[in-house]
């Protein structure tokens, strides 16, 4: 099995172009099911979650082509409605395809997504919304069988938590449903606006994205379109954290600073000088990072839970004690035990991590427990003295395109062996 090996302590310098957003491209790929013909998606990241999405689409009868960062999905001949269990297990976000499959075929069969590395991740909000839209759902032998007798119909839906995935699934289902749908207490993440921009360019009528009430007027038909995925704000935050822990100055191209306000503010509080010019960020880190007393993950526009592991790694090298409160997922600190092997001093209790800043870290063998936890290990290893070997890197490859060559191109001593 491949491992990432890092000899830490190198100062980084140079420029990285940030990939397209994983959390945008997955629902957009699901959305291609809603038209007949070729959808062209630019700025698609080359990551294994996209490969898994292709397998799902191809299993449903689509033809997928990839050239560099452009993807073409031909959905003319969709003839399936099932996502196989192994693909559901590989990528929990497969549940995002549910609304679109039902929208296209009137039915869908998926296996129940159980727990995952971030703790139990129920899909009750997705299912109760779909039921309101006319879907009958039965659970047999671990399979969720969804069917609609007379097609999807619009509904007035109130989410008791602004779930990103549920909001996207409802938008996908409602785009071609009969009548109007309101989503109250909708998630406001930029990736949701990106999905709506994509669907609107196919002829959908979706408004209010970015606010907590989204309105969708169902249309009879959607048409193939061309769309460019927004930059990945969590990947950008990862490279900023890498610069921060190594006291480096780097430039990031293809970013969307307006999507990163809470992250940028935290990096600045830690002492990093960050200049935003259009879509370019220039980051200059201090020799020693400031202590940031408390960071809380929240729904957008609050501090993103996905950037939590990166700043926990970063604050491990700050000049004091910091508290990170994880408010979105129940079990997001599994990576902390691995991080502590590198010499971080982090204690966790429930949703709280107490991070005691240390002067230096030292390389060790460690193992990825999840995607962003893996990126946190890479971040810490870049600063650690000596060699770090990181195993189970398939988690990292789910969401990061070329992370090893990107970091290597700006001076990190990093390789895959
Ligand atoms: C998406 C992102 C993920 C990010 C998360 C929160 C994608 C592919 N993934 O995940 O990277 O960390 O948003 O920003 O876009 N919940 C329920 N019932 C539901 C749905 C969710 O209780 O039906 C709970 C979850 O268990 C979790 C919280 O709501 O505690 C947030 O989940 P949600 O916003 O749905 O995250 P995802 O869409 O799974």
Image: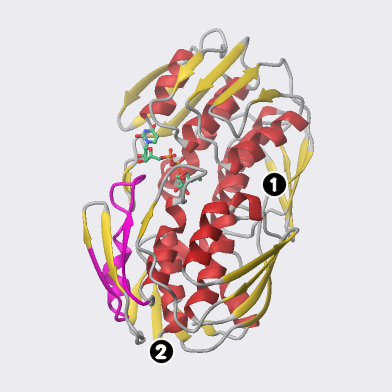
- Closer to the camera, 180 or 277? 277
Q: Which residue is drawn at 59% across and 83% down?
A: 12
Tell me if residue 1 can be seen.
no
Assess disc 1: are there few (<14), some (14-19) or many (≥20) residues with their C-alpha within 10 Å of its C-alpha: some
Q: Residue at x 46, y 69 (%)?
A: 270
Please provide the residue range marked out in magenta: 319-347
Residue 254: say if magenta.
no
For residue 199, side relative to residue 417 (left or right)? right
Measured as percent of width and height from the top left, residue 382 is found at: 47, 81
Quadrant of the rendered image containing residue 401: bottom right
- 14 vs 331: above or below: below
Q: Can residue 245 be seen in this view?
A: yes
| Location of residue 14 in the rendering, given as x and y in whole percent from the top left corner | 68, 80
Residue 197 located left or right of residue 48: right
- Between the C-alphas of marks 2 and 1, the distance is 40 Å
Q: Name the residue under label 2.
A: 387
Element under label 2? strand
Which of 340/251 is in front? 251
- Point out which mark residue 64 bears: 1
- Disc number lying in front (2 or 1): 2
Q: Does the magenta-highlighted stretch encompass residue 342?
A: yes
Identify the residue at image location x=54%, y=72%. Answer: 272
64 vs 260, left or right, is right
Please say if 105 is above or below 358. above
Q: Is residue 324 above or below residue 225?
A: below
- Horizontal side, residue 389 vs residue 355: left or right: right
């Amino acid at each position: 099995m491949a491992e990432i090996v890092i000899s830490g302590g190198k100062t980084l310098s140079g420029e990285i172009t940030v990939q397209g957003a994983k959390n945008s491209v997955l629902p957009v790929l699901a959305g291609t099911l809603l038209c007949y013909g070729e959808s062209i998606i630019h700025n698609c990241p080359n990551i294994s979650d996209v490969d898994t999405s292709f397998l799902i689409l191809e299993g449903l009868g689509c033809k997928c082509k990839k050239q560099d960062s452009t993807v073409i999905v031909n959905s003319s001949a969709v003839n399936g409605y099932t996502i196989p269990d192994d693909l559901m297990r590989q990528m929990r976000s497969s549940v995002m395809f549910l609304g679109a499959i039902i929208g296209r075929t009137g039915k869908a069969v998926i296996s129940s997504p159980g727990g995952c590395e971030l703790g139990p991740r129920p899909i009750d909000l997705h299912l109760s919304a779909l039921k309101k839209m006319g879907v009958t759902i039965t659970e047999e032998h671990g399979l969720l069988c969804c069917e609609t007798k007379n097609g999807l119909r619009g509904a007035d839906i109130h989410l008791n938590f602004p779930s990103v995935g549920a909001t996207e699934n409802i938008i996908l289902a409602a785009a071609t449903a009969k009548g109007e749908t309101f989503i109250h207490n909708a998630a406001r993440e930029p990736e949701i606006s990106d999905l709506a921009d994509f669907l609107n360019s196919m002829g959908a009528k979706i408004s209010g994205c970015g606010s907590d009430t989204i309105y969708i007027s169902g249309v009879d038909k959607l048409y193939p379109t061309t769309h460019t995925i927004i930059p990945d704000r969590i990947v950008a935050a990862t490279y900023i954290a890498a610069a921060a822990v190594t006291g480096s100055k780097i430039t990031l191209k293809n970013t969307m600073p307006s999507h990163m306000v809470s992250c940028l503010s935290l990096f600045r509080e830690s002492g990093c000088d960050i200049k935003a010019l259009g879509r370019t960020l220039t980051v200059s880190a201090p020799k020693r990072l400031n202590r940031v007393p408390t960071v809380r993950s929240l729904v957008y526009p609050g501090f993103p839970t996905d950037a939590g592991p990166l700043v926990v790694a970063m604050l491990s090298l700050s000049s004091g004690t910091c508290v990170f409160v994880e408010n979105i997922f129940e079990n997001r600190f599994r990576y902390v035990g691995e991080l502590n092997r590198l010499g971080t001093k982090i204690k966790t209790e429930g949703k709280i991590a107490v991070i005691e800043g240390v002067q230096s870290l030292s390389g060790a063998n460690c193992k990825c427990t999840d995607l962003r936890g893996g990126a946190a290990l890479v971040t810490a290893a870049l600063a650690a003295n000596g060699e770090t070997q990181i195993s189970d890197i398939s988690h990292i490859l789910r969401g990061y395109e070329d992370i090893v060559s990107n970091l290597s191109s700006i001076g990190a001593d990093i390789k895959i062996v």
